[in-house]
Image (cartoon, rainbow, N blue to C red):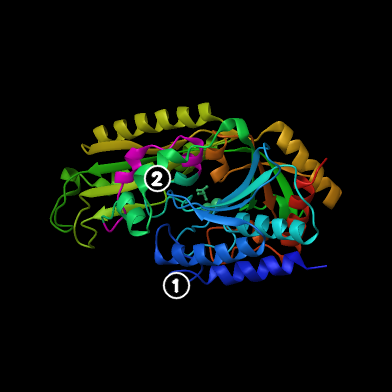
């Protein structure tokens, strides 16, 4: 009997090497690293008996046709990583279903429906200020306008996709028929401490949080740090500091809300000049959209008031938003039964991270399987899931796929 956990661990270690130089994994969409990952995943998909195709949104699709006239069950996640991220986030949700399909093939088990394993190009939104293009294309919710978004080198998403050999403007033709989409299962490292604290290898997700991101720019006046009197300064960084503190205060005081200022640039950013411009991102997350939206409104009011008080110019633009998404109760129950059959019990939990599943929910019912995450750390090189837990996840996926 193959040790699917060990095979999974060695494959994840192997594909983790496909990265830009530096600590951890940096594999961004429509890059040479993405190209190499597609080649390796193609090999593994073919070994599992799947026919492989790369769609014009950059999603690699491994398909196993079922009996004629039956629908399709989807599984998958994203091939891309954050910068210097871990070896499990996203890619685990591609490698494990491929191995589950390989195991069913080896055991001669035919499924009652078709299956597609999906390796989405971009979920993290690190290279371009957008994300989820693959699942949005399949769900028919892709906004062609995002093709004009550019990365920090000024390359548009459209150009990057063309250079990758794709036809980006054909993305709208990828919309799948909801009538034949049975459901979608995403397997993902938990990225938090809940399963480890509970001593559980697997968990079943109840809902995925909603998210919104804002770009804030504060503009004051620069001047000599030694000669400009404090009383006549319009220091953009002092205004930004007030807003950063308020984001943290508001999120800490509001149940079910997380707030983060993740990126901040200062201009002219020199030791002996008063900061003139500060650009920063604010991200708000909650499983309850009303809570998130109320926090965004309160923050906008606080920022306006702060800018007025400090005689700063303020712009605050929402650059991204994704609603909270409940997992389908029937699929989730079935997944819970599969996990219980394998582990004896099942722990359910919400996801504070967003996932491709959030967008797939516009196409079909979704379910998510979480795998224990060592120390609860993710988006860092130390991210880790054990071979045992990986093997248990393959077992649970097979039990789920072959349920009565
Ligand atoms: O930000 C997230 O939650 C996901 O990792 N992209
Ligand atoms: Mn992820
Ligand atoms: Mn991630």
Q: Is residue 234 above or below residue 330?
A: below
Q: Where residue 130 is drawn, which disc sits there?
A: 2
Q: Can residue 354 be seen in this view?
A: no
Compared across the picture, whether 256 is left or right of 151 comes to: right
State how far apart marks 1 and 2 are (Cα).
24 Å
Compared across the picture, whether 59 is left or right of 305 comes to: right
Which class describes the residues within 10 Å of circle 1: few (<14), some (14-19), or many (20+)?
A: few
- The image position of residue 159, as x and y in percent, is 30, 53
- The image position of residue 9, as x and y in percent, is 67, 68
User: Where is residue 403, by image quadrant?
Assistant: top right
Compared across the picture, whether 20 is left or right of 13 comes to: left
Residue found farthest to the front:
68
Q: In this view, does 135 lie above or below 4?
A: above
What residue span does the magenta drawing correspond to? 135-153
At horizontal 28% and vertical 55% (from top left) the residue drawn is: 155
Name the residue carrying label 1: 22
Q: Is residue 238 visible?
A: yes
- The image position of residue 152, as x and y in percent, is 30, 56
User: Where is residue 207, by image quadrant?
Assistant: top right
Mark 1, mark 2: which one is toward the viewer? Answer: 2
Which class describes the residues within 10 Å of circle 2: few (<14), some (14-19), or many (20+)?
A: some
Q: Choose between 321 and 99: the one closer to the eye.
A: 99
At horizontal 65% and vertical 37% (from top left) the residue drawn is: 71
Q: What element carries label 1?
A: loop
At horizontal 60% and vertical 60% (from top left) the residue drawn is: 88
């Amino acid at each position: 009997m193959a040790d699917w956990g060990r095979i999974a661990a060695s494959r994840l270690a192997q594909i983790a090497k496909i990265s830009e130089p530096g600590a951890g994994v940096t594999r961004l969409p429509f890059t040479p690293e993405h190209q190499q990952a597609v080649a390796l995943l193609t090999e593994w998909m073919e070994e599992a008996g799947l026919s492989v195709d790369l769609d014009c949104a950059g999603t690699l699709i491994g398909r196993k046709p079922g009996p004629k006239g039956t629908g399709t069950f989807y599984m998958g996640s994203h091939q891309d990583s954050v910068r210097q991220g871990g070896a499990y986030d996203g890619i685990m949700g591609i490698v494990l279903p491929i191995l589950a399909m390989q195991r069913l093939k080896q055991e001669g088990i035919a499924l009652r429906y078709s299956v597609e394993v999906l390796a989405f190009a971009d979920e993290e939104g690190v290279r371009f200020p957008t994300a989820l293009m693959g699942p949005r294309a399949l769900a028919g919710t892709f906004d062609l306008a995002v093709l004009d978004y550019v990365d920090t080198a000024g390359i548009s998403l459209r150009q990057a996709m063309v250079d990758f050999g794709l036809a980006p403007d054909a993305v709208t033709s990828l919309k799948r028929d909801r009538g034949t989409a049975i459901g979608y299962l995403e397997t993902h490292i938990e990225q938090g401490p809940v399963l480890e604290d509970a001593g559980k290898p697997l968990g079943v997700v109840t809902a995925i949080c909603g998210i919104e991101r804002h770009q804030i720019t504060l503009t004051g006046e620069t001047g000599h740090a030694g000669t400009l009197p404090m009383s006549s300064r319009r220091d953009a960084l002092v205004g930004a500091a007030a807003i950063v503190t308020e984001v943290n205060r508001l999120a800490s005081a509001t149940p079910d809300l997380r707030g983060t200022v993740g990126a901040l640039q200062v201009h002219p950013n020199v030791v002996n000049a008063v900061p003139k411009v500060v650009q920063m991102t604010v991200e708000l997350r909650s499983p309850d959209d009303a809570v998130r939206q109320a926090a965004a409104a309160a923050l906008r009011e606080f920022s306006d008031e702060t800018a007025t008080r400090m005689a700063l110019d303020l712009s605050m633009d929402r650059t991204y938003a994704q609603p909270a998404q409940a997992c389908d109760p029937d699929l989730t129950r079935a997944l819970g039964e599969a996990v219980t059959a394998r582990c004896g019990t099942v722990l359910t939990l919400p996801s504070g991270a967003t996932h491709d599943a959030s967008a797939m929910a516009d196409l079909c019912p979704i379910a998510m399987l979480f795998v224990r995450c060592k120390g609860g750390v993710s988006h860092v090189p130390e991210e880790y899931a054990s071979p045992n837990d990986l093997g248990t996840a393959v077992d649970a996926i097979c039990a789920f796929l072959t349920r009565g």
